[in-house]
Amino acid sequence: MRPTGQRAAPHRKISVEGRRAGKAGFLSQPGGRRISQEIWTDVLAYVRKNISEVEYHTWFAPVRAIGVEQGELVLGVRNSFAQEWFRKHYLDLLEDALRSLGAQSPQVSFQVLPAAQDALMLSEPPPAPPLRQSAKAPPSAPSPAPNLNPKYIFENFVVGPNNNLAHAAALAVAESPGKAYNPLFIYGDVGLGKTHLMHAVGHYMTERFPGKRVEYVSTESFTNDLINAIRDDKMAQFRNRYRSVDLLLVDDIQFLAGKERTQEEFFHTFNALYENHKQIILSSDRPPRDIQTLEGRLRSRFEWGLITDIQSPEYETRVAILKMNAEHNRINIPQDVLELIARQVTSNIRELEGAMMRVVAFASLNNVPFSRAVAAKALSNVFTPQEIKVEMKDVLRTVAARYGLPAEVLRGAGRMREVVVPRQIAMYLIRDLTSHSLPEIGLFFGRDHSTVMHAVSKVSENLEKDAELTLTLADLKRQLSGLDDPENDVQDTRF
Ligand SMILES: Nc1ncnc2c1ncn2[C@@H]1O[C@H](COP(=O)(O)OP(=O)(O)OP(=O)(O)O)[C@@H](O)[C@H]1O
């Protein structure tokens, strides 16, 4: 195995020294563009439900997400007229959409795209749909074999005890198509990687044997193609298309059930390919014996090769999948946050990926670093809310991010004021929010308990005379408790 629409009262943005001093590091990471596209896809889905189709196509379709900067979603529009129009007519709608994603003080700004960039962005493929429950991601870039998702390759497939047999069989088939197991029949529940594995074989074949023809089709598309071919009197083309391939990948074959004409045609397609030693891979949500109203001759053919299943991934595999996904999107998410997500979503990998992107969107839009509390809050609308106990490392990371410092610097030997002040604040907050003793906190920072005692009294003393520090601490506590704990909620009364 590889390593493994409720409207909330608007918050006034709290301007505090720390917020100016440092922003959450991941926002400026290369994955930022991807994050804003994920967010924009969700915002568009919300907007579309609330305005007419004509309005949507006129105004929203040409808009591009440029990025998320310090919690603000930056949108690119085509001209200053559109910019003004958005500000006047759609700002509330966009803010509501961001609130529905968990943004507590939603902020949107508009930039006019330079003509060249506009043309460039408009020629880009539409943003990838969110990696979540219902949608299966289509290809986001041209691929040598049509209909193959470029992300679905062997290198991106995490192998665990739940899928190692299916993976080994797919690899064997990719290496010896038409010889190893024919057909290869992969079954398992929704969102567990069947399509991913099929596409991986397709990619492998087109790379290793560039002349080979690969066809991926869902059973539904196969049926529709057949209906159209019959209607348009184009059966010869239909047969030629499906019977001249080297590798035929058919998804969701259980949908053949009850479709007599499609079964008949598929039977002949199967025979033609099989007799010519062409590889066939089928996926289904159940084994052939459990597909009702499937002709016996098809069922027995499906059983000729190898039948293999994919089970739900266990915890370690789920963490490994999340880790790989974060790396793939170039987003730096701490291990304990990934572990929290992996504990929440246990069965469907598409949902697991969707949950991670929800956490990423939530943290980006609220401009806070990743923490378990933030992740729990981001997922609380979808999954059973989790009670998160604040840990020392949560405080360390949150304070460090606030001051734009790497977390380990606060535990290091540095004695400069820029490091000492945040270190003392971290010690104070750990003392306040956890049950750790002074010596335990000292040990965590590689220091004596008296240093911690001094830090705690110094911060308490400063709190009495420094309003800015009071706001910083209140905001840090808010972040550490998942953002909107009313007890720690502070409105900035200076505005
Ligand atoms: N082992 C894995 N490693 C990495 N990603 C995985 C793995 N298994 C599944 N995924 C990811 O989970 C998502 C869902 O996978 P996929 O679409 O292949 O599921 P499926 O079993 O075909 O679902 P359905 O029954 O809905 O057709 C994809 O984004 C896929 O990349």
Image (cartoon, grey):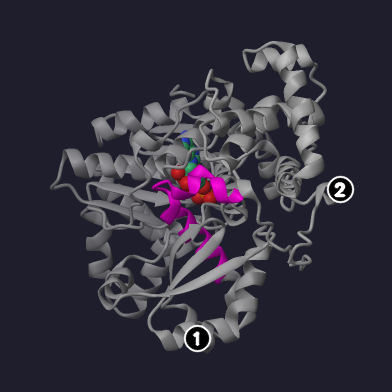
* Image coordinates for residue 464, horizontal then vertical, percent: 82, 41
Identified at 38% across, 44% down, the residue is 152
Q: Residues within 10 Å of mark 1 (few under 14, many from 20)?
A: few
Q: Quadrant of the N terminus?
A: top left
Magenta segment includes 460: no
Magenta segment includes 21: yes
What span is in magenta? 19-44
Label 1 sits on residue: 84
Query: How many marks do you count on the picture?
Result: 2
* Image coordinates for residue 495, horizontal then vertical, percent: 73, 67
The residue lying toward the viewer, choosing from 336 and 3, is 336
The residue lying toward the viewer, choosing from 28 and 305, is 28
Pointer 1 residue Cβ closer than 8 Å to ligand 1 = no
Using the numbered discs, state the Cα–Cα distance from disc 1 to disc 2 in whole angstroms: 39 Å
* Residue 269 located left or right of residue 90: left
* Image coordinates for residue 37, horizontal then vertical, percent: 46, 60
Residue occupying the far left of the picture: 211
Residue type highlighted by circle 2: Glu
* Residue 131 located left or right of residue 240: right
Pointer 2 residue Cβ closer than 8 Å to ligand 1 = no
* Image coordinates for residue 298, horizontal then vertical, percent: 44, 47
Residue occupying the far right of the picture: 487
Identified at 82% across, 47% down, the residue is 488
Label 2 sits on residue: 487
The residue lying toward the viewer, choosing from 257 and 369, is 369
Main SS category, magenta section? helix
